[in-house]
Image (tube, rainbow, N blue to C red):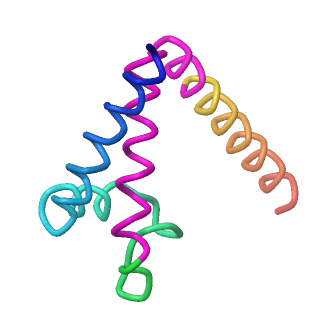
Amino acid sequence: MWTLIWIVVFLVVAGFGYKSWDGSFGEQVKKYVPEPIKPDETTAATDRYLWPIVAGILVATLVIHPISTIITLVLIAVIAFLVKWLLGVVLSKLH
């Protein structure tokens, strides 16, 4: 049953993301995605298909397992903070 709910949520979110790529969804992706993976003219054909699928997977997983998803995101944020802090310490020692 949970798999069916996940698939339905995924299809709804991915469908709306694909449909509104030229509108609000595409603008939000271009606004909030980091520069190295930001959609541009050279990758426009694949980005229209890729980002709605990514959003569908994330939202569907968040709907089915919200606590696990939030804990994972917090863990990723803590690891990123520690890596950034360590790089700052190492770079300050080198200069």
Front residue of this view, candidates 89 and 59: 59
Q: Residue at x 44, y 62 (%)?
A: 50
Q: Please check the rendered image and state whether residue 64 is part of the magenta-colored stretch, yes or no.
A: yes
Q: Main secondary structure of the magenta part?
A: helix
Q: Is residue 29 above or below residue 43?
A: above
Q: Is residue 79 left or right of residue 1?
A: right
Question: Measured along the vertical axis of the image, is residue 35 above or below residue 79?
Answer: below
Q: Quadrant of the N terminus?
A: top left
Image location of residue 89, percent across then percent down: 78, 45
Coordinates of residue 38 in the picture (x, y in percent): 42, 68
**Residue shown at the point (18%, 59%) measured from the top left:** 19
Q: How many marks?
A: 0
Percent of width and height locating residue 3: 48, 23
Identified at 25% across, 50% down, the residue is 15
Residue farthest bottom in this picture: 42
Q: Determine the residue located farthest toward the left in the rendered image.
A: 23
Q: Is residue 34 above or below residue 5?
A: below
Quadrant location, the C terminus: bottom right
Q: Is residue 59 magenta?
A: yes
What is the quadrant of residue 52 in the picture?
A: bottom left
Q: Which residues are magenta?
A: 46-73
Seen from the viewer's position, the closer of residues 90 and 68 is 68
Q: Position of residue 13 (x, y in %)?
A: 28, 41
Left or right of residue 43: residue 73: right
The residue that appears at 24% across and 55% down in the rendered structure is 28
Q: Nearer the viewer, residue 94 or 48?
A: 48
When the figure is inspected, residue 5 is found, relative to residue 55, above or below; the finding is above
Which of the two residues, 5 or 13, is positioned nearer the viewer here?
5
Displayed quadrant of residue 58: top left
